Image: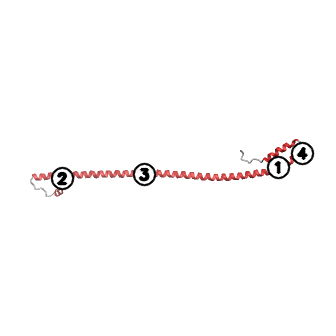
Amino acid sequence: MSPYPRSPASAISSSTSSSALTGSTHRQGTTSETLQTSFAKGKGKSTLAQMKMDLDERLGSLNSSSTDQQYRMGVLKNECKSLKLQAHMRDKEIAHLQAEGVQERQEAEKIHHCMMEQKKLEIDLLKEEGEILHLKVELAKLQASQTASSSHPPPTSATEQFANM
């Protein structure tokens, strides 16, 4: 299928009828042939002009549609680039948030570890203080038993014993 318009049927039929007239009389054939050829030329000019106008219209519509398509293609390319940029920025944001999360987790682990060590040291300190108190009580008992055996009067209170130490 050609993009050009088809020639009208009258131009085709006039050329076939002029070739059919050449058989009977030469003089009549030449006169009618000239008339039909001039008629066909006149028709051909108007047909040619019509075809040219049709082609110009089609080219104009193709040009405007191609301009529209180029515009749409440009818009779509810009949208594509914009979406790619947004996706890239979103990926960078996700990576940044993940890195922040890792850093916060590491800091929290360090703080937790320090707090656990501090609590452990506090527990050890309390155990040692408990051991010291236990030993002081044992010392007080021994001193009380020694004092009772040596017949010295026992100190009046346990606090005085601790104060003497």
Q: Amino acid at mark 2?
A: Val
Q: Residue at x 44, y 51 (%)?
A: 99
> What residue would you read off at disc 2?
137
Q: Is residue 48 left or right of residue 128?
A: right
Q: Residue at x 49, y 51 (%)?
A: 92
Q: Amino acid at mark 4?
A: Gln
> What residue would you read off at disc 3?
101
Q: Quadrant of residue 157?
A: bottom left
Mark 1, secondary structure of its residue: helix
> What residue would you read off at disc 4?
28
Graded by Cα atoms within 10 Å as few (under 14), some (14 to 19) or many (20 or more), the crowding at tag 1 reads some
* Mark with earlier residue (1, 2): 1
**Mark number displayed over residue 41:** 1
Graded by Cα atoms within 10 Å as few (under 14), some (14 to 19) or many (20 or more), the crowding at tag 4 reads few
* Mark with earlier residue (1, 3): 1
Mark 4, secondary structure of its residue: helix
Mark 2, secondary structure of its residue: helix
Q: Residue at x 87, y 47 (%)?
A: 32
Mark 3, secondary structure of its residue: helix
Residue situated furthest top in the rendering: 23
- Quadrant occupied by the C terminus: bottom left
* Mark with earlier residue (2, 3): 3
Q: Nearer the viewer, mark 4 or mark 1?
A: 4
Q: Amino acid at mark 1?
A: Lys
Q: Amino acid at mark 3?
A: Gly
- How far apart are the two marked residues, 4 and 3, measured between alpha carbons? 105 Å
Q: Nearer the viewer, mark 2 or mark 4?
A: 4
Residue 134: x and y in percent read: 20, 51
